[in-house]
Amino acid sequence: MAKDIGQKKFIHDIKHRRHRYRQFLGVALTILFSVAGQPKISWFVFGLILVFTGISVRLWASGHIKKDKALATDGPYAFVRHPLYVGNILLGIGFALASGLWWSFPLLIGFLIGFYPPAIRKEDKKLHRLFKEDWEKWRQVTKALIPRFTPRKKDQHGGWSFWQSLRQNGEPVIALFLLLCLYYLFLKLI
């Protein structure tokens, strides 16, 4: 009976609350791509560039988050509504390339399609509820994942903070973990 409830709850959560598993599975994919990886130098270099770009975008974004207190429209949020997700996508593609594993791409695409559209809808709904008209104005000129070419200048406030990045997301710790995974892949090249 308890096993049945556990399986039903898991299936229900995957269908309706999959956002709970997004971070765990993202970390699991990174570890899988690193451990199983068979890197080739040219693909590794392209992957390295994307991983560094993804880490940079995430560090930049996490230092601007105001977590339910104010709508972040400065820094990377002046270009795109979900820069942390953009960073994650760059990281995923980067690790898939760096790993040299052909099957990493279909797995990554399935993960991205399965988890990011619902996460974006949920996040946008929450931000709309919290910031109403301000969010509407921002959404009209700022796409979810495709960055603008020029930053939105109106209503910008605040600035980047390392401590905010550390407190809100633990981002510098995450960056260190990602760099260690990348280094592990690099060691397979030499």
Image (cartoon, rainbow, N blue to C red):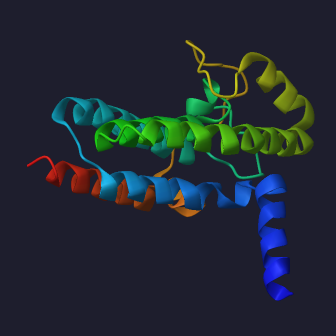
Q: Nearer the viewer, residue 118 or 143?
A: 118
Is 99 drawn above or below residue 18 in the view shown?
A: above
Q: Nearer the viewer, residue 162 or 109?
A: 109
Residue 120 occupies quadrant = top right
Residue 129 occupies quadrant = top right
Q: Is residue 48 left or right of residue 118?
A: left
Q: Is residue 123 left or right of residue 58?
A: right
Residue 114 occupies quadrant = top right
Image location (x, y in percent) of residue 177? 37, 60
Q: Nearer the viewer, residue 7 or 67?
A: 7
For the question of whether residue 33 can be seen, the reply is yes
Q: How many numbered callouts?
A: 0
Image location (x, y in percent) of residue 176? 35, 58
- Residue furthest toward the bottom? 1
Image location (x, y in percent) of residue 105? 46, 36
Is 54 drawn above or below residue 6 in the view shown?
A: above
Which residue corresponds to the image point at 24% horizontal and 47% vertical from the top-left?
Answer: 38
Is 177 drawn above or below residue 58 in the view shown?
A: below
Image location (x, y in percent) of residue 2? 83, 87
Which residue corresponds to the image point at 83% horizontal and 79% vertical from the top-left?
Answer: 4
For the question of whether residue 158 can be seen, the reply is no
Which residue corresponds to the image point at 78% horizontal and 83% vertical from the top-left?
Answer: 3
Which residue corresponds to the image point at 38% horizontal and 51% vertical from the top-left?
Answer: 33
- Residue furthest toward the top? 149
Q: In the rendered view of the protein, which quadrant contains the N terminus? A: bottom right
